[in-house]
Image (tube, rainbow, N blue to C red):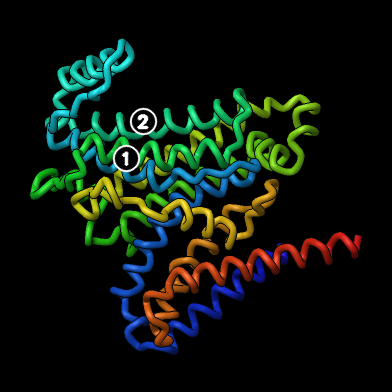
Amino acid sequence: MKKVIGLIAFLAIIYLLLLAADPGARLAANHFNLGRRIGLYGIISLGAGMLIITGGIDLSIGSVVGLCATLLAMLLRGDRFPRFPFKGWLFDQFNAGLDWLGSLVNFPEHPWAAILLVLLVGMGIGLMNGVLVTKVRVQAFVVTLCGLFIYRGISRFMAEDQVKGLGNQFGQLKSIFYSSEAIFGLPMSLVYFVGLLVLATVFLHWSIHGRYFFAIGANEKAARYSGVATDRYKILAYVLCSTLASFYGVLYLMQENSAQPSSTGNFLELYAIAGAVLGGCSLRGGEGSVGGLVIGTSILVLLPNLSLMLGIPSALEYTVIGGALLLGAVLDEVLRRVGQRSR
């Protein structure tokens, strides 16, 4: 609770400084744009946070976003997927599967089927990551770092390294996921984020399954000896993380109207992890809260704005974020040691 109160105070200071530094920051349009960014970054920070609570990590979030955004754009455009140039039965079957997929559904006429397929791809990636970590016992850092390169390469190969845009099509679909008109004064990304926050709060803080997440992160061996299906819940955490990353890819495509396979989603895994850590999630696992994730994401979004208002060059944006993250990590370690001594 003390940590959350401290985060709220820090966020309030940043917000007040931002309002004092520039009168334009008080405009409703600026708050609307901030809400949109908080909603987008909050979605991936929520997925990363739930995974970090279990003691896991995912460095492939940005590449999953790029892959899913590119895949969705190609499906909605009705593009033909390139064939893998390698020889062998496995690649022949994969190429045949691509042909079968293209003939199964006319995705430009059924865009919701394309969105569902993209979300399933995200779930499949999370499932594969979780199985490799829990069953094969490969370190999560290695698995997801390899995924960062693999999924980025696949997206570039699929799109032949070309930008995939939607043009003026799918206006109704775009209005559902991205609209310049507010709902209850909130941008669409923030509306989806709030809905996900409600579900995450119920799951993490009001259900036994959420308590298992915290127990696994705090002491996985003790949780396993207590009868918790640790592997199953860790796999679930990876699935949730990658699924939310794929959902971010859908929102990104609807907002930007195009996807660049070589750059879409770059560094998003760092933003997701930074938002979770700034919100009080310990990289050791077992600590964190949904409220803290909201505060951490808000701090992550407001910090670059504040640095810009104070005259700090935009080139130093990553330096500001990294410095704040390092400061938060140092304070977390100091407070942890002080707490241990007092006990």
- Residue located 24% across and 38% down the image: 72
Mark 2, other Cα within 10 Å: few <14 / some 14–19 / many ≥20: some
Q: Are marks 1 and 2 in contact (CB under 8 Å)?
A: yes
Judge from the rendering whether residue 53 lies leftward or rightward of residue 74; answer left or right: right
Up-down relation of residue 23 to residue 43 (above or below): below
- Indicate the amino acid at tag 2: Val
Residue 291: tell me if it is visible: no
Tell me the residue that label 1 is attached to: 67
Query: Looking at the rendering, which quadrant does residue 152 occupy?
Result: top left
| Lower position in the chain sequence, tag 1 or tag 2 | 1
Frontmost residue, 232 versus 149: 149
Residue 7: tell me if it is visible: yes
At which x and y percent is residue 228?
72, 27
- Residue located 18% across and 28% down the image: 82
- Indicate the amino acid at tag 1: Leu
At which x and y percent is residue 308?
39, 81
Up-down relation of residue 5 to residue 286 (above or below): below
Query: Looking at the rendering, which quadrant does residue 56 occupy?
Result: top right
Quick one: which residue is furthest to the front in this view?
A: 87
At which x and y percent is residue 254?
23, 49
**How many dots with numbers?**
2
Tell me the residue that label 2 is attached to: 121
Q: Label 1 vs label 2: CA separation? A: 9 Å
Mark 1, other Cα within 10 Å: few <14 / some 14–19 / many ≥20: many
Frontmost residue, 85 versus 26: 85
- Mark 2 lies on a secondary structure that is helix
Up-down relation of residue 237 to residue 166 (above or below): above
- Residue located 36% across and 82% down the image: 26
